[in-house]
C-alpha cells in the first residue's frame, strides 16, 4: 500500500458526498491503511459546491488534497468535475456522474451551463470514466443511492478487495437499505462508460 | 478497536475518558460535533446553552461544584464567552475546566477569521493545539490534568481541518472520578477587587510555572532530521509541513501554543541555520521568537490571511507550483443557496418587494443576501440585527422606521436578540423585528434550542413562548405569519411597518429538512400556460429553471411548498393532479 493515494470527492451539497467519503475511509481503514478524511460542514452544504478528501497509505500527514494531487477525482456532478479538474494529477482518473444540476446563477440566467462539459474535461488530457449514476441509482431502487453507485465505480479503480467494500457498506448504511445499496454498488462497480452526455 | 473519528468526535472521546461530567455549549461551525458526540455518552450531562457566555458560566459552575467540565464554541463564540473566560483565569478551578474553541481559517462558514490564540495570551491561559484526531483525544485528557495541577482553566484550540478531518483513534476507558469536595473560599472564588488583586499576581506566577512546564513537556517536541533548516509549527500546520517538506527539515512541533517555551525554541534555533515559523493567521509564535531575540522567518514569507496547505508551504518556501491540467474558463460558480421549500424564501421575497432596509443576522437566512433575493443589507454578529436596527432608526428618524426591519432566527434570537429587543422597547424606536422561527438551529445542522421543546438528547422540555416573551418585555404588537403564504406575509409586513410602536412578526414554518416535515408532491409547469416571463425565477428556488423558454420544475428537488405558484400570473404552476 505504502504510497499515499488521494481520492477527491466533489459534488453539490445534499448529494451524499459525506457518506461516500466515510465509506471510502472505512474501507481503507479495514485494509490496515493510515487514513485521513476531510469533510465539509456548515454553510457550503446548502446546495453549494462541496469537496471531501480521502487519503490513505502507510502514513498520511495532510488531510487535504491540493492542486495536482488527486489520483481519482470522483465527481457527483458534471460541472463540478470541470471545476476541480486542476486538483487531479496529470495522469489521474476522473470518475464522473453525467447528471447535470444547474447552479443558481444558471437558474437565474446570469450564467450558462457550458455545453459538453465532460468532453472538454477529456480534451484537457484527463482519463475520464463518465456514466449516468442517477439512472443506475433509480435502477437500484432509489435516487438517493447515487453516492453508493459512484463509490462502486471508484472501487473498481482502487486496489482493494471487493468484499471489503461490501462489508463496509453493510456496516455503514441503515439495515433496511442494505440490499438496495449493495445493488447500487454492484451497478456502479460494473458501470461502463456510457455515451457522453447520456 | 481503531476508529476513524472526526477531530471533534475525538475531543468528545477525550472528555469521556477524562471523566468529564458536565458539558455546555452553543453550536457553531466548526465546533458543533464535539458536543453532539459528547451527548451520546450517558455518563456526561450535555446541553445546548442559549449562548456561549451561558455555556462557559455553566462549565465554571460545574467546576466550582467539583466536577470536570467543558464548554465548546467556535472562534466568534469565544468573543461572547470572553467575560467569564478572563475572570475564570483569575479564579482557577476546583474540578478541571476546559474551553474548547474552533477557529475557521479560510472562513468556510464564518463571518471573520480571528485567531483565538490571542485570547489565550490576553486571558493568560494555557492553550493546547492538537494536529489530528489522536492528539485531539490525548490533548483533551492532558488539558484536565494541567487544569487541576496548575489551578487554571485550559483552552483547547482546534481549526476547521482538525475538527472536520477524520483520522485514526483507538478509544479507551473512562476514568471515573469522585466529585471533589466543595469548600467555601471567597478569596479564591469571589472576584471583588480586594480578592482579585492578589489573584492577578498569582496568575502571573502561574504563567511562569506553565512556561517552565512547556520547556520539557512531551507535547512540545523536536524532530531532528539533521537539517540546516528548521520549522516551528503547531496544529494542522505541522501536518501540512510534513506533507510538503518531509524529512528535509527539522521540526519543533508545539503542542502547547501558550505559554511558549523560550529556551526550547532557542535550543532548536541553535541547531539550524535557517528557521521558519509556519503558522496560519496571526504571527503569534513569530512575535514571541522575535521578542526573545530568536531570528526567524514568518509572515515575511507566509500569508496572514486564509487557510494554509501543503501547497502554500511549498509555494512560499520552495517556490514550486504543481503540474496541473488546464482550468476550464467558463465554469459558473455554485454558491450555497436556500434549500427547496426553505421557509425563509417567501419572507425574503416579501422583503425584497417591500424595498426595505434589512438588518441581517447569523444563520441559514444570511443566504437572503445572495442573488436573486439580495434582501439583506448588513450582517455583523449574533444578535446585531435587532440592536443594529434600533441604532439605524435612531440615526435616521421616523421615516426610516417605516422602511426598515431586522431579521433573526429563533436560535439567534434566544442567543442574543432578546436584549436588543428589550432595548427597542425600552428606548422606544418603532422598529419592526422579524423572528424567522423555523423550529430548529438550522445552519449548524439541526440542533435543538430553547424554543423547540427538546433537549440535546431529544427529551421533551419546556419551550420558550416567543409571543409571550416579546409581549412581556414591552412589545405590544406581536403577530405570526406563515412565510409559505406570500399574501399574508406581505400584508403583515405592510401593516407593521405603518403601525405606531415597535412590533415583532414571527415568520413561523419548520425547516423543510426536518424529518417530521411532510413534503407535498412536486409541482409541475403546464407548458401551454407558461409564457416564459421568468417571474417564478425571482425567488431563487434551485428546483425551478428555464428549459426551452418555459419554466421547468425538477421533481427530485421540489417539495411542493407552493411559494412559486403565487408568483405565476398565468396559473401555469400546479399540482400533478390538477394538470391531469
Image (cartoon, coloured by chain):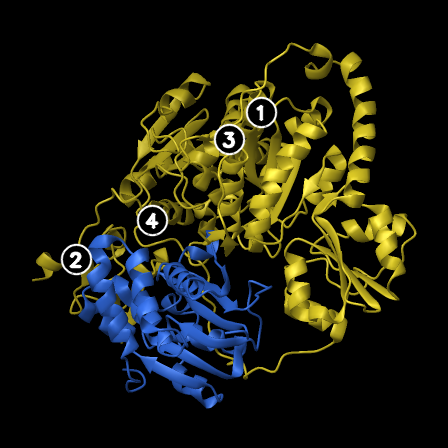
Q: What is the distance, in whole Å, between disc 2 and disc 3 at their CAs?
A: 47 Å
Q: Which residue is mark 3?
A: B24
Q: Please report whichever mark, 4 or 1, sits nearer to the chain's N-terminal start.
A: 1
Q: Kindly report the distance in space between the C-alpha atoms of the residues bearing marks 4 and 3.
A: 29 Å
Cα separation, mark 4 vs mark 1, equals 35 Å
Query: How far apart in space, not on screen, are marks 1 and 2 (Cα)?
Result: 53 Å
Q: Check the residue under mark 2 and report the chain it is in.
A: B
- Is tag 4's residue or tag 3's residue first in the polypeptide sequence? 3
Question: Which quadrant of the structure image shows residue B499?
Answer: top left
Compare marks 4 and 2 and give the one earlier in the sequence: 4
Q: Is residue B346 above or below residue B391?
A: below
Q: Name the mark on residue B342.
A: 4
Dot in front, 4 or 2: 4
- Compare residues B395 and A66 and report the one nearer the observer: A66
Q: Which residue is mark 2?
A: B574
Whole-percent x, y for residue B541 in the image: 33, 58
Amino acid at each position: 500500500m505504502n504510497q499515499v493515494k488521494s481520492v477527491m470527492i466533489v459534488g453539490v451539497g445534499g448529494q451524499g458526498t459525506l457518506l461516500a467519503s466515510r465509506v471510502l475511509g472505512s474501507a481503507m481503514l479495514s485494509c490496515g491503511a493510515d487514513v485521513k478524511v476531510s469533510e465539509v460542514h456548515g454553510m457550503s452544504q446548502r446546495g453549494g459546491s462541496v469537496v471531501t478528501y480521502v487519503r490513505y497509505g502507510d502514513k498520511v500527514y495532510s488531510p487535504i488534497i491540493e492542486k495536482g494531487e488527486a489520483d481519482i477525482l470522483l465527481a457527483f456532478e458534471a460541472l463540478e468535475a470541470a471545476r476541480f479538474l486542476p486538483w487531479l494529477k496529470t495522469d489521474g482518473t476522473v470518475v464522473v456522474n453525467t447528471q447535470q444540476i444547474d447552479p443558481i446563477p444558471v437558474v437565474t440566467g446570469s450564467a450558462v451551463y457550458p455545453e459538453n462539459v465532460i468532453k472538454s474535461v477529456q480534451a484537457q488530457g484527463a482519463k475520464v470514466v463518465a456514466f449516468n449514476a442517477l439512472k443506475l441509482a433509480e435502477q437500484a431502487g432509489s435516487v438517493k443511492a447515487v453516492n453508493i453507485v459512484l463509490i462502486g465505480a471508484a472501487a473498481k479503480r482502487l486496489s482493494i478487495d471487493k468484499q471489503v467494500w461490501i462489508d463496509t457498506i453493510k456496516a455503514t448504511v441503515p439495515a433496511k437499505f442494505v440490499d438496495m445499496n449493495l445493488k447500487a454498488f454492484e451497478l456502479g462497480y460494473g458501470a461502463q462508460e456510457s455515451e457522453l452526455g447520456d | 478497536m481503531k476508529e476513524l473519528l472526526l477531530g471533534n468526535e475525538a475531543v468528545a472521546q477525550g472528555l469521556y475518558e477524562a471523566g468529564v461530567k458536565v458539558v455546555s455549549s452553543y453550536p457553531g461551525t466548526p465546533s458543533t460535533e464535539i458536543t453532539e458526540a459528547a451527548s451520546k455518552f450517558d455518563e456526561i450531562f450535555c446541553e445546548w446553552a442559549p449562548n456561549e457566555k451561558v455555556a462557559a458560566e455553566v462549565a465554571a459552575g460545574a467546576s466550582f461544584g467539583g466536577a470536570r467540565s467543558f464548554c465548546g464554541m467556535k472562534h466568534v463564540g469565544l468573543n461572547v464567552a470572553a467575560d467569564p473566560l478572563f475572570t475564570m483565569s483569575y479564579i482557577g478551578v476546583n474540578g478541571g475546566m476546559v474551553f474548547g474553541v474552533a477557529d475557521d481559517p479560510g472562513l468556510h462558514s464564518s463571518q471573520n477569521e480571528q485567531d483565538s490564540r490571542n485570547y489565550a495570551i490576553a486571558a493568560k491561559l494555557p492553550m493546547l493545539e492538537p494536529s489530528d484526531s489522536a492528539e485531539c483525544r490525548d490533548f483533551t485528557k492532558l488539558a484536565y490534568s494541567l487544569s487541576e495541577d496548575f489551578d487554571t482553566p485550559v483552552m483547547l484550540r482546534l481549526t476547521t481541518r482538525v475538527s472536520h478531518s477524520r483520522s485514526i483513534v483507538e478509544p479507551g476507558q473512562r476514568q471515573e472520578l469522585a466529585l471533589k469536595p466543595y469548600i467555601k473560599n471567597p478569596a479564591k472564588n469571589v472576584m471583588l477587587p480586594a480578592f482579585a488583586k492578589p489573584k492577578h499576581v498569582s496568575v502571573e506566577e502561574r504563567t511562569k510555572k506553565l512556561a517552565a512546564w512547556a520547556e520539557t513537556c512531551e507535547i512540545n517536541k523536536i524532530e531532528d532530521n539533521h537539517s540546516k533548516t528548521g520549522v516551528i509549527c503547531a496544529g494542522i500546520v505541522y501536518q501540512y509541513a510534513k506533507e510538503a517538506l518531509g524529512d528535509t527539515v527539522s521540526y519543533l512541533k508545539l503542542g502547547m501554543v501558550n505559554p511558549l517555551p523560550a529556551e526550547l525554541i532557542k535550543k532548536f534555533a541553535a541547531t539550524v541555520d535557517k528557521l521558519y515559523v509556519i503558522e496560519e493567521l496571526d504571527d503569534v509564535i513569530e512575535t514571541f521568537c522575535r521578542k526573545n531575540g530568536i531570528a526567524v522567518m514568518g509572515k515575511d514569507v507566509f500569508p496572514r490571511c486564509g487557510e494554509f496547505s501543503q501547497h502554500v508551504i511549498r509555494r512560499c518556501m520552495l517556490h514550486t507550483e504543481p503540474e496541473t491540467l488546464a482550468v476550464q474558463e467558463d465554469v459558473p460558480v455554485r454558491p450555497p443557496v436556500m434549500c427547496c421549500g426553505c421557509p425563509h424564501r417567501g419572507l425574503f421575497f416579501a422583503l425584497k418587494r417591500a424595498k426595505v432596509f434589512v438588518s441581517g443576522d447569523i444563520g441559514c437566512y444570511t443566504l437572503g443576501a445572495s442573488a436573486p433575493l439580495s434582501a439583506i443589507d448588513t450582517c455583523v454578529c449574533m444578535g446585531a440585527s435587532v440592536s443594529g436596527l434600533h441604532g439605524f432608526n435612531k440615526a435616521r428618524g421616523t421615516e426610516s422606521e417605516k422602511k426598515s426591519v431586522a431579521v433573526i432566527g429563533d436560535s439567534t434570537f434566544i442567543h442574543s436578540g432578546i436584549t436588543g429587543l428589550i432595548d427597542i422597547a425600552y428606548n422606544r424606536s418603532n422598529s419592526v423585528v422579524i423572528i424567522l422561527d423555523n423550529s430548529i438551529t438550522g445552519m449548524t445542522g439541526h440542533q435543538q434550542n430553547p424554543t423547540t421543546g427538546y433537549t440535546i438528547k431529544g427529551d421533551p422540555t419546556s419551550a420558550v413562548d416567543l409571543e409571550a416573551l416579546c409581549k412581556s418585555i414591552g412589545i405590544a404588537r406581536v403577530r405570526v405569519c406563515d412565510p409559505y403564504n406570500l399574501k399574508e406575509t406581505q400584508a403583515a409586513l405592510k401593516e407593521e411597518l405603518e403601525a405606531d410602536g415597535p412590533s415583532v412578526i414571527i415568520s413561523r414554518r419548520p425547516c423543510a429538512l426536518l424529518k417530521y416535515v411532510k413534503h407535498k408532491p412536486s409541482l409541475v409547469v403546464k407548458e401551454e400556460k407558461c409564457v416564459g416571463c421568468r417571474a417564478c425565477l425571482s425567488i431563487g428556488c434551485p428546483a425551478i429553471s428555464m428549459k426551452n423558454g418555459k419554466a421547468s420544475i425538477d421533481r427530485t428537488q421540489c417539495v411542493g411548498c407552493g411559494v412559486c405558484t403565487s408568483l405565476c400570473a398565468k396559473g401555469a404552476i400546479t399540482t400533478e393532479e390538477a394538470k391531469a
